[in-house]
Amino acid sequence: MSFQQRVLVALLAGAASAWAATANVTVDYSKPKQTLSGFGASITWTANDLGNFSTADQAAILSALYNTAGPSAGLSLIRAGSMLCQFEPSPGSYNFNDPLIQSEMSWINRVKSTYGVNQVMVSTWTPPAFMKSNNSCSNGGSVLTQDYPDLANTMVLWMQNAQAAIGQPINVWSVQNEPDQSTSYDSANYTPAQFISFVTGYLKPAMVNAGLSTKLTVPEPSVWGGPSYYDSNWGYPILQNQPQMDADIDIMSTHDYGANYDLSSPSQAALQYNKPMWQTEVYRGHSYNGSITDALSWADSIYGALNGGNFSVWCYWWAMDYTGDNGGLIAYSNTNWTYQIPKRTYAIGNFSRFMRPGSIVLTSTSSNSNIEATAVQPVSGTVALVLTNSSKQSITTTVTFSGVSTLPSSLTPYRTSSTENQAQLSPVPVSNGAVTITIPAQSIVSLVG
């Protein structure tokens, strides 16, 4: 290669680098989208382990999950399990004092009183064994039709017990966790027709008769598969030409497993029937990964869910996980009762700590595909914006805010990177409706004000 050719290559590389190192982001307040209901994780089964930690570690774990005053996951929703097999082990015999249930009530009350988190979703993993076709808590099986009335009454009684225990109604009740799965642990199967029959004929009338205000969600399948799969297998079969089901169901829900876990396209059935869409469980990987690379993948999932998928809730799987895989926001040992906090906990918190329930997602665009911008009109303040840089170089980003009459004079950045956990940085000035900030390689920055 000649000297002239080397110079040309260097100039071209420098020009490409300069182009790649800048981004223009626009946040448009005049184009609001869905209202957020929150971010959460499940305490099913693992809540019972919290008491095995030292008092100081218990407080530190809950703070890392819910405390919005400092670096944390900033969760605003608690997902629990109904444990109906323990609640009604035999016909007409009820035990709300089962440790698995009571540990959840204790967790909910503690988080509610300490951190003000009072949104509770409860999923049923299985009805009582004697109500099922296989007479087992596990390995799938369907509810016997003749037991629909009893199951509805059992669920209502559980909700009433829980309401008394936590001093408020359960916010959302999921009729069945993963109705498409038959697993070696608690599980049961429903078809769309069975959901319709049970909900409209028995569960909703029983709830109305009991004066319960709890909202209902279905179907919560294991596989999202994109809107084409979800809508054809669940969304439209449940809602289309079903006016009573449409009236009785408040929320449509899904987990985000399966080959296509991209949440950036909305369910058309949910949109058509004006149902909020909740993603209530996801994790990937069967070996522990606490890296920033893993964290960035979850920032990307949330970005797609909020900006393109019209989701109102995004949940990780477990709040705590002892199995050594990637299933929890807190990874812990159930032999020596130590714990560690993976980077994803703080990455998720870059969104959930500042985007509280009631925030409204705003339309935002980025000129650089390496900068993902997610913005909301927050319930407190004016700006809550997350900028994620997945590339391996810093990107200087100029954000322009449009359609808003008043902006703060400066915004406070909170940065998560391979070495930082929501580190609070010096405020950056807002000038003429815009702010410029450099987002380091492989980092997530929240701008708040």
Image: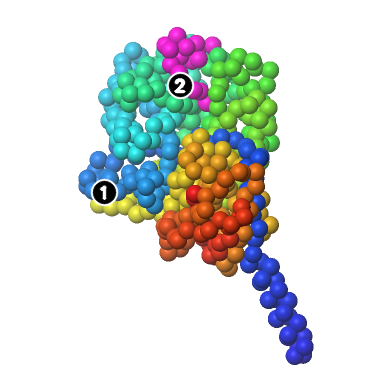
Quadrant of the rendering where the N terminus is positioned: bottom right
Which residue is disc 1 drawn over? 57
List x then y, in percent, for residue 10.
Answer: 70, 81
Q: Which residue is mark 2?
A: 214
Q: Position of residue 160 (x, y in %)?
A: 36, 18
Q: Judge by depth and name the residue closer to the eye, 370 or 243.
A: 370
Q: Does residue 125 belong to the magenta stretch?
A: no
SS label for mark 1: helix
Q: CA distance from mark 2 to mark 1?
A: 33 Å
- Relative to 21, does residue 47 appear above or below in the rendering? above
Please report the residue visible at 68 percent of the width from the left and 27 percent of the height from the top: 272
Q: Residue furthest top?
A: 209
Residue span colored magenta:
201-217
Place of residue 23 in the rendered image (x, y in percent of width and height, measured from the top left): 65, 61
Residue shown at 33% from the left, 37% from the top = 111
Residue 209, magenta (yes or no): yes
Amino acid type shown at disc 2: Thr
Which amino acid, by three-letter code, is at mark 1?
A: Asp
Label 1 Cα neighbours within 10 Å, binned few <14 / some 14-19 / many ≥20: some
Compared across the picture, whether 392 is left or right of 160 comes to right
On the picture, is 253 further left or further right than 213? right
